């Protein structure tokens, strides 16, 4: 039995297989509409989410399976003091596979130690969110036709952004990727990420200027700069607009660059960018469903 | 200073000077009924000064705990007054319930029944990471 707790639980070959399956699902959805018939997915969301939970549920329904679960800790036995492992052991008596989100880091790993069915980490605090990474990889693959040989800029909060850390980690296993980290000094990429790139001999640059990096980028991955991350409000006010993507900043970008964002956005991408053909973040949302369909099939060993 | 030789037991040698009480605590030697000698600041040609712990009973030592605290310690096994085995330690790959995660966001800080598991992440820097949240902990030396 396999779980997905961290993106590195999957080999590069397995990720490539998932991407290939997801792309086939996109082309031939009918072929897959009954592969999970009579199977049940439990979505255990100990904290709220819109996209991830609905995406998992939509994925399971798209495979002909059914879903059960809860969408907040208040509506589960956690409110009575039940441990995560007990909740998951209980639910694994009812469902064939579990997707769980929990505010505490490592909760899905704890759950996987006692679960009778596969566990998918749907986000554990600021730690991991591997299905977002799979979504990002599928989107880049669909936009570029490959996961090798391109320049990707990560912009915004690189210090606390789990999606960014996880995607850098995943991409560092491919070849020919140049990383550009664009952030204010306060929100720079943690040292351990830079060190791991150095160890692998992978090139990266750090800059505070989005404008300076823009012409070099094939992919721009935007993240939210949150006010509460700053030590003082003056720094936040000084920097917040620097990292807001608007049509003016895009004038120097490549024509085929693609803009990604894990969403939700607040104001870091102007709504006027949405109509630009390079804006791919809603396509990214759509891809999230297909890669989760491929993942559920893999973990349940289902074939079309 | 004379300390009687161990007849059947264990000598923990080459302990970094000053670290013996920490080892005493981690190995729970206070719970033993046998003679235990703690020697602080013994002269050492290799280390200048060192600590030594002599335990006059053939107990099972948790070598993982010892290796984590200080992989340079040597463990001498004594039988009938003779040294029969000298064990050199290494940093263990996995520590279970030896150290606990200090990350307040880690699930193990909420749910105390979970085993505290740490995995060796960088042998050169002697660092471990929590198996749950990946928070880093350094070995003592």
Image (tube, coloured by chain):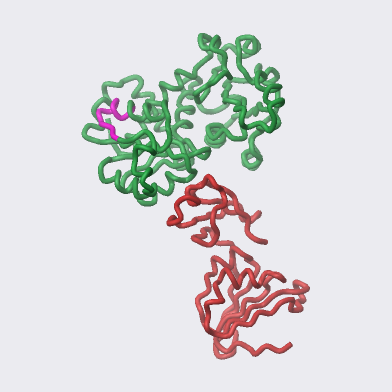
Q: Position of residue A250 (x, y in %)?
A: 62, 12
Q: Residue at x 41, y 29 (%)?
A: A52
In depth, the one of A290 and A162 nearer the eye is: A162
Does residue A148 appear in the picture of this structure? Answer: yes
Q: Position of residue B49 (x, y in %)?
A: 76, 74
Above or below — where is A260 with respect to B124?
above
Q: Residue at x 31, y 37 (%)?
A: A42
In this view, which residue lies farthest toward the left?
A: A38
Q: Position of residue A74 (x, y in %)?
A: 38, 38
What is the letter of the red chain?
A: B
Q: Position of residue A31 (x, y in %)?
A: 26, 24
In depth, the one of B39 and A196 nearer the eye is: B39
Q: Residue at x 60, y 79 (%)?
A: B76
Relative side of A217 to A36, left or right? right
Query: Quadrant of the image for the C terminus of chain A?
Result: top left
How many marks the image carries: the answer is 0
Q: Colour of chain A?
A: green
Please check the rendered image and state whether residue A60 is part of the magenta-colored stretch, yes or no: yes
Above or below — where is A9 with respect to B69?
above
Please check the rendered image and state whether residue B7 is part of the magenta-colored stretch, yes or no: no
Above or below — where is B15 with respect to A26?
below
Region of the chain picked out in magenta, as a range: A59-68
Does residue A173 appear in the picture of this structure? Answer: no
In this view, which residue lies farthest toward the front?
A: A80
Q: Splitting the image into 4 quarters, where does residue B46 fall?
A: bottom right
Relative side of A207 to A113, left or right? right
């Amino acid at each position: 039995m396999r779980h997905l707790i961290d993106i590195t639980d999957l080999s590069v070959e397995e990720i490539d297989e998932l991407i290939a399956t997801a792309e086939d699902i996109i082309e031939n959805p009918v072929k897959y509409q009954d592969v999970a018939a009579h199977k049940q997915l439990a979505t255990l969301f100990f904290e709220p989410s819109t996209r991830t939970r609905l995406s998992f549920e939509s994925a399971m329904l798209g495979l002909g399976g059914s879903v059960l679960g809860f969408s907040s800790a208040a509506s589960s036995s956690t409110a009575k003091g039940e441990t995560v492992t007990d909740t998951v052991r209980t639910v694994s008596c009812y469902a064939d596979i579990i997707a769980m989100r929990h505010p505490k880091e490592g909760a899905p790993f704890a759950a996987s130690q006692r679960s009778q069915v596969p566990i998918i980490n749907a986000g554990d605090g600021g730690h991991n969110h591997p299905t977002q990474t799979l979504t990002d990889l599928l989107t880049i693959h669909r936009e570029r036709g490959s996961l090798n040989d391109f320049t990707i800029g990560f912009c915004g909060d690189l210090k606390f952004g789990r999606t960014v850390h996880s995607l850098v980690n995943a991409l560092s296993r491919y070849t020919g990727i140049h990383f550009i980290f664009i952030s204010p000094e306060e929100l720079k990429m943690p040292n351990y990420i830079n060190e791991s790139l150095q160890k692998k001999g992978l090139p990266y640059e750090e800059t505070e200027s989005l404008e300076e990096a823009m012409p070099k980028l094939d992919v721009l991955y935007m993240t939210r700069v949150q006010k509460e991350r700053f030590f003082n409000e003056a720094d936040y006010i000084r920097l917040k607009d620097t990292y807001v993507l608007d049509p003016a900043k895009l004038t120097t970008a490549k024509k085929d660059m693609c803009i990604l964002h894990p969403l939700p956005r607040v104001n870091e991408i102007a709504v006027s960018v949405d109509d630009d053909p390079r804006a791919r973040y809603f396509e990214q949302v759509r891809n999230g469903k297909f890669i989760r369909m491929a993942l559920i099939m893999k973990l349940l060993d289902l074939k079309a | 200073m004379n300390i009687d030789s161990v007849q059947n037991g264990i000598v923990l040698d080459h302990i970094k000077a000053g670290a013996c009480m920490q080892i005493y605590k981690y190995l729970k030697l206070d719970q033993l009924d046998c003679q235990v000698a703690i020697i602080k600041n013994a002269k050492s040609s290799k280390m200048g000064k060192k600590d030594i712990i002599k335990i006059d009973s053939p107990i099972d030592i948790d070598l993982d705990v010892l290796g984590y605290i200080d992989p340079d310690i040597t463990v001498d096994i004594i039988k009938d007054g003779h040294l029969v085995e000298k064990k050199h330690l290494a940093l263990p790959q996995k520590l279970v319930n030896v150290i606990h995660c200090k990350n307040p966001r880690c699930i193990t800080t909420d749910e105390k029944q979970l085993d505290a598991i740490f995995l060796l992440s960088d042998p050169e820097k002697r660092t471990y990471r929590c198996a749950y949240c990946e928070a880093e902990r350094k070995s003592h030396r």
